[in-house]
Image (cartoon, rainbow, N blue to C red):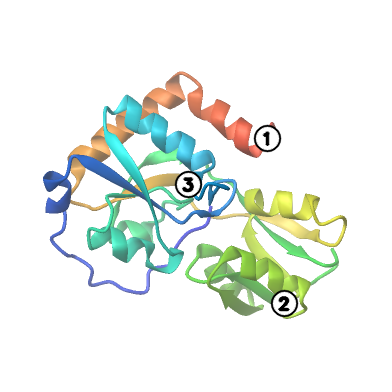
Amino acid sequence: MKTLILTTAALALTTGMALAQSQTIRMGTEGAYPPYNFLNDKGEVDGFEREVGDELCKRAELTCEWVTTDWDGIIPNLVSGNYDTIIAGMSITAERDEVIDFTQNYFPPAASAYVGLTADIDVTSAVVSAQASTIQAGHVAASGATLLEFATPEETVASVRNGEADAVFADKDYLIPIVEESGGELSFVGEDVQLGGGIGIGLRESDTELRAKFDAAIQSMKDDGTLNTLITKWFGEDAATF
């Protein structure tokens, strides 16, 4: 999944008290990464994570509301108390876990992939675009390719179409519908790459009680098959499930 590479470390603010002072849990998401999360025609948060989050809140007996934020500030805004969770296609990584806490995963580890205008690109020497501050960007930088970073996922794909980049590297689940809808303009390049340890809900390290509630709710959705049903609904029959 898309994963943020932390560039700031001193974010240990004492904002866990915000949860104790509020009975409404604010669910932070990007709203720009379909099918995980996006804004529908009514301007409301929609997608796989909206359905998962609403069901988790119901099972945990929590009143929740949704908040959108830019990806590059999604962890700092959690730590500073602007919302109480991150549910935004965020993979669980050891680096991120040093700053925030995570629930168990609600989406299993999935593949990242390269997409270009042709399928014969050497991605180790090409110019490759990726969303800034993601684990995909880190992978490209370490691969020997020239990394071209953009603030939004839409810009990474546009950079391939307009010739700025030879290929884009992102979650395959995000890229599949883009390739299918391109009418043959775009193609997958090379082999899939496994990154990250699945997607979890990000929380402040001080919010241990909230984490326990969400962990229990996630486990119940795994146990009764609800998570697999939603994964298949939003990502297709071939998607990885529990």
- The residue under label 2 is 165
Say whether disc 3 or disc 1 marks the residue closer to the N-terminus. Answer: 3
Q: Give the amino acid type for the residue marked by disc 3 in the picture.
A: Val
- Label 1 – label 2 distance at C-alpha: 29 Å
Residue 163 location (% of width, % of height): 77, 79
Quick check: 80 left or right of 223? left
- Label 3 – label 1 distance at C-alpha: 21 Å
Q: Give the amino acid type for the residue marked by disc 2 in the picture.
A: Ala
- The residue under label 3 is 45
What numbered label is drawn on residue 192?
Answer: none
Quick check: 86 left or right of 51? left
Quick one: SS at disc 1?
loop
Question: Disc count in the image?
Answer: 3
Q: Give the amino acid type for the residue marked by disc 1 in the picture.
A: Gly
- The residue under label 1 is 236
Quick one: SS at disc 2?
loop
Label 3 neighbourhood size at 10 Å, few (<14), some (14-19), many (20+)? many
238 versus 224 height, above or below: below
